[in-house]
Image (cartoon, helix red, strand yellow):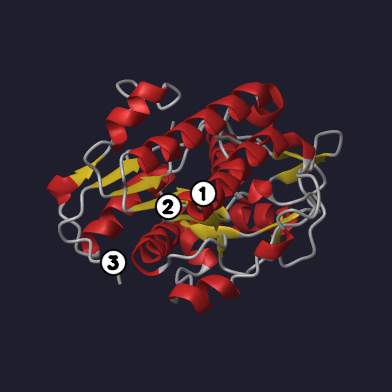
Amino acid sequence: MLDLTNKRILVTGGAGFLGKQVIEQLIQAGANTEKITIPRSQDCDLRVLDNCHRAANQQDIIIHLAAHVGGIGLNREKPAELFYDNLMMGTQLIHAAYEAGIEKFVCVGTICAYPKFTPVPFKEDDLWNGYPEETNAPYGIAKKALLVQLQSYRQQYGFNGIYLLPVNLYGPEDNFNPQSSHVIPALIRKVYEAQQQGEQTLPVWGNGSPTREFLYSTDAARGIVMGTQLYDDPDPVNLGTNYEISIRNLVELICELMEFEGEIIWEKDKPNGQPRRCLDTSRAQERFGFKAQVEFKQGLKNTIDWYRQNPG
């Protein structure tokens, strides 16, 4: 096990939704708060190579969480930005980390990298068996390129980089901005605002048929830190729960938990996104003992409660 006690650790995206949880889990695992560095995008734009070199200098471990990311709406509106920003941040930081002699690089990828039609549950070995779902392919391919980079740097330079693939995340402090949020925070906000305005209907994109799997943010953070300490292989690893729910059932469950009794209107002219998403999570359990702990309904309750206390 990698002892974190005296390690200098850089966490990109460390001030974000997942990042805050990762910092907390690092400290619980023995990391020294004073030796954790969190670069902020306004001061350290990782799309600029010199900034990557400065960030990587004098570090032992880098955990790369920073990403330009959003839901279907943002992916349709800004595919070029999502491709360029994520590719440049990741590939330059990995190269700077290699040049700085970093002991370990932990890259957090995305399940948007999987092919649109992947046998369910998704196994890591299926990553290259087709093209990703069109709406998020630019983002998914940019992130998947980082896996290739880490594997090639390991092969040529002996660089220790690992690649983790968390499923859709959710939890308190998520991004609830309707322009860029993912499905759970978007739905919670939509139901909350419908209640505040006395609406009797709830319009939802698609037809409700796609399925998704969701991982609570504290579980994801725990998996990332466990991988940091216990995993050193080139193979990508899924982080998830292996629990699949349809968007229709998800909407109904959120409405039930929030006591919204209006009619759900399915906007069938809007995109559904990838038909199914559910991960095979056996590799994470076998390689470094990770298993999700937070039950989905409880995680949803926690997220709804947080948003009601912090609306807007």
Residues at marks 2 and 1 touching, judged by CB atoms closer than 8 Å: yes
Going from the N terminus, do you reach mark 2 or mark 1 first? 1
Q: Residue drawn 79% across and 43% down?
A: 272
213 relative position to 6: left or right: right
Q: Residue drawn 56% across and 68% down?
A: 241
From the image, which quarter does the N terminus lie in?
bottom left
Measuring from the top left, give residue 22's x and y in whole percent: 34, 53
Tell me the SS state at disc 3: loop
Q: Amino acid at mark 3?
A: Leu
Quadrant assignment, res 2: bottom left
Label 2 Cα neighbours within 10 Å, binned few <14 / some 14-19 / many ≥20: many
Mark pair 2, 1: CA separation: 8 Å
In the picture of the structure, the residue carrying the numbered disc 2 is: 159
Q: Which mark is residue 150?
A: 1
Q: Amino acid at mark 2?
A: Phe
Going from the N terminus, do you reach mark 1 or mark 3 first? 3
Quadrant assignment, res 97: top left
Mark pair 1, 3: CA separation: 19 Å
84 relative position to 263: left or right: left
Q: Which mark is residue 80?
A: none
The reply to whether residue 283 is visible in this rendering is yes
Asked if 277 appears above or below 272 in the picture, the reply is: below
Q: Which mark is residue 2?
A: 3
Going from the N terminus, do you reach mark 3 or mark 2 first? 3
Camera-nearest residue between 273 and 83:
83
Asked if 126 appears above or below 10 in the picture, the reply is: below
Label 1 Cα neighbours within 10 Å, binned few <14 / some 14-19 / many ≥20: many
